[in-house]
Every structure is written in structure tokens, then in C-alpha cells.
Amino acid sequence: MEHVTGARDLVLTAAFPDLAVLARYVGFRLGRLPGVSATRSQTATAVHTEGSRWRLDRLDPDSQDLLARDRAPAMPRRGLPAPDALDTRLYLLLSEDFRQPAARLAERLGVSPTTVRRRLDRMHRQDALIYRCEVARHLSGWPVSVTLWGIAPAGEAARIASQLIRMRETRLCASLTGPHNLLLTVWLRSAEDIGAFEARLADRFPELTVADRAVALWQLKIAGHVLDPLGRHIRGVPVTFWEEPGAEQAEDALLRRLRVPR
């Protein structure tokens, strides 16, 4: 969640199991919060890259090799079974603190450490777990975060996205529904670089139109952690599955009204 400049005040990136839950969240959660005057939503049809893949390039090659040495090759994602109840509980515990040892996780789950290790190994092979190490942006050397909404011809969008993700500054690139079919979030070294970066985009992708842009004033929350204005950690907010009886009741009340013919 970011406080940004431009035509909107807040930008939220969220995950939902399906579009019905997204509709409930927007209509009966966000829409009922005091002070919310309007919302606009777009769904990502594909996420081409995200923050866990971005590199600060501060480690030498030997250190990078050491980190990747024991990583098993990922299994294809297609056809993977849905997580069961134990997987889900394990995900939630890891979102609190992924550095917990297997013995501690097993104790909290009421299973054996062998079971936890076996499931973690499977999740790693399936690439079902993504680890990321975030830094305070103002200390990273890339203190300016800019989100761009672009319009690309349908036949060129995939090609353009494949090249955008190779650019050093790219933190997030996604295909969207709606009038803007590409979203790009980049980290830059200064506000003066914004114009230069857009000029590079125009030169490299003349068929891509940047339709809107927003500069992050305060990245309030990222990857389950609340941050101060300088990007320093304040507290964690463990990832959970959204449940709110009030929103469900409001949705049920609307459905009952819709069933009554006028």
C-alpha cells in the first residue's frame, strides 16, 4: 500500500482467491471505510516480474553462488494440487517469521519436524514459497519509486513486457485489464531521473504510451510489514485470508433485495 502523487491518493496491491471475493472487498469493505470517496480496481492477468526477483547487486559472485547452491530446481507450476489445511497453516506461520526453525513450526502445528521439512522441501521444489529481503528504500541508492500505467498494442504487449523486466530499474511489471494494459513500477536514483527514464521508454518502445504515472510519497506497507516514511520497519502484519462477517452480511442483504422482483 502506497501513498502516491497524481490522480489517486492510495495504491493497493492485493491478492484474492477469485473475482467474487475482490468484488466483496471493494464494495463492502473499502467502500464502507470512513473517508473513502471512490475506488478503481484492475486485475492482473499476468505478473511478469515482482520485487522478490529484483537485485541490489551488492553481493560478489561467490556470495551469490553460495546463496543459490542448495536451491533445488523449481517444478512446473501447472497442475499443482491446491494447498491443504496443513499447508495453509504453515504458510501463515511462515508469514509471521520465515526464520523459525522446523522444530518450532512443528511444535506450533502439532506435527513432527520431519513432516514440516518434507512439506517445506515440496513447496520449494514447486516454487510455492517465495522469499524476499527488502531494504529501506532511502538507504538502497534507489529512493524514488514510480508506478507507470501504459497502453501497448495487444499484439506487442507480451514482447514489450519481456523486455521491460530486463531493465535494471524494474521492480514490478504486470499485464492488466482495463484501459491501461501494462503496469510498471520502477525504482530510480532521483526524481530528476523520472523524465529521463520515460524518454528511454519512448525511444525503445515507440508503440508504448505512458498514460499515467504516480510517485510514491510513503510506502506504508510491503510484504506484510508496516513501514515509516523512510521505509524502515515498524511492525509486521502476518498474511492471513481475509474474512469479515460484516462484509458478508452486507453482501447477503444486497442479494436478498435483488431476489425480490420490483
Image (cartoon, rainbow, N blue to C red):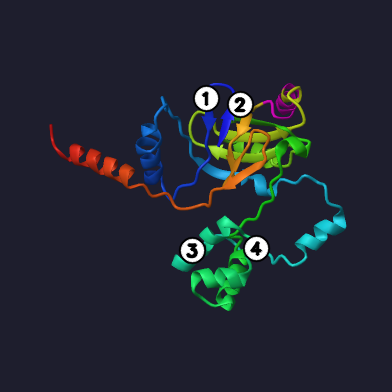
Residue type beneath disc 2? Ala
Q: Is residue 219 above or below residue 123?
A: above
Q: Sequence-wise, which precedes: disc 4 or disc 3?
A: 4
Q: Are marks 2 and 4 in contact (CB under 8 Å)?
A: no
At label 2, counting other C-alpha atoms closer than 10 Å, the crowd grade (few under 14, some 14-19, many 20 or more) is many
**Marks 1 and 4, how far apart at CA:** 38 Å
Residue 220, picture quadrant: top right
Horizontal and vertical percent position of residue 168: 76, 39
Using residue 204 as the reference point, say whether residue 79 is left or right of it: left
Q: Are marks 1 and 3 in contact (CB under 8 Å)?
A: no
Residues drawn in magenta: 195-206
Residue type beneath disc 3? Arg
Q: Sequence-wise, which precedes: disc 1 or disc 2?
A: 1
Q: Secondary structure at mark 4?
A: loop
Q: Dot 3 corresponds to which residue?
A: 89
User: Which label number is shown at residue 8?
Assistant: 1
Horizontal and vertical percent position of residue 147: 62, 31
Residue type beneath disc 1? Arg
Query: Which residue occupies the foreground of this view, 141 or 109?
Result: 109
Q: Are marks 1 and 4 in contact (CB under 8 Å)?
A: no
Q: What residue is at 64 percent from the left and 40 percent from the top? A: 172
User: Which label number is shown at residue 214?
Assistant: 2
Q: Is residue 162 above or below residue 113?
A: above
Q: Sequence-wise, which precedes: disc 1 or disc 4?
A: 1
Q: What residue is at 83 percent from the left and 51 percent from the top? A: 59
Residue type beneath disc 4? Ala
Q: How many marks?
A: 4
